[in-house]
Amino acid sequence: MSPQRHDPVERLNDHHADDLLAVARVFGGCSDATSERAEGVDAHGIDLVVTTPRGLVAARVPFSEQSPEGSRRELRAAFHDLARQARAALAAQGNESSTS
C-alpha cells in the first residue's frame, strides 16, 4: 500500500496561507481581504473563499499558464508562480502583507 498523499487544497491552506492571502488581494478582486481559504484547485486555477469587511466573497483565480495534466508538480509550480507575481505586485504598491 502506498503512503497517503497530502490533499493539495489542504496543503495550500495549512502551509501557504500568506501566499493565498496575497493572491486573493491581487488577483481575486479582494484588496481588502483579511483572510482566505482555498476550496478547490485544478489545472486552471484556485477557488477561494475570502473574508473581507464586506463579508465572505467567492473568488476564482486562474493560473497564468494552465497545467495541461494538472499533476501535483505542475499545480505546485503554477501556484508558486502566481504567489510570486502577487507578492511582487503588493511590494510595488507598497502594501506587502506582514502576516508572517
Image (cartoon, helix red, strand yellow):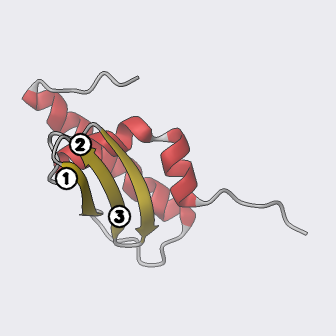
Q: Give the alpha-carbon distance from disc 1 to disc 2, as whole Å.
A: 7 Å
**Amino acid at pointer 1:** Phe
Q: Nearer the viewer, residue 30 or 11?
A: 30
**In this rendering, which labeled residue sits more in front, label 1 or label 2?**
1
Name which of mark 1 and mark 3 comes first in the sequence.
Answer: 1
Q: In which quarter of the image is the N terminus?
A: bottom right
Q: Residue furthest left?
A: 93
Image coordinates for residue 48, horizontal then vertical, percent = 34, 58
Q: Are marks 1 and 2 in contact (CB under 8 Å)?
A: yes
Per the image, label 2 sits on a secondary structure element best described as helix
Task: Give the residue pinned by disc 1.
Answer: 27
Tell me which label, 1 or 2, sits earlier in the chain. 1
Question: Can see residue 67?
Answer: yes
N-terminal of the pair, mark 3 or mark 2, is 3
- Nearer to us of marks 3 and 2 is 3
Which residue is located at x 30 percent, y 63 percent?
63
| Closer to us: 42 or 30 | 30
**Residue with the mark numbered 2:** 86
Q: Nearer the viewer, mark 1 or mark 3?
A: 3
Within 10 Å of disc 1 (Cα), the crowding (few <14, some 14-19, many 20+) is: many
Residue 47: assigned label = 3
Percent x, y of residue 93: 8, 30
Quarter of the image for residue 65 reads: bottom left
Which residue is rendered at x = 20% and y = 44% of the image? 25
In the figure, 91 relative to 38: above or below?
Answer: above
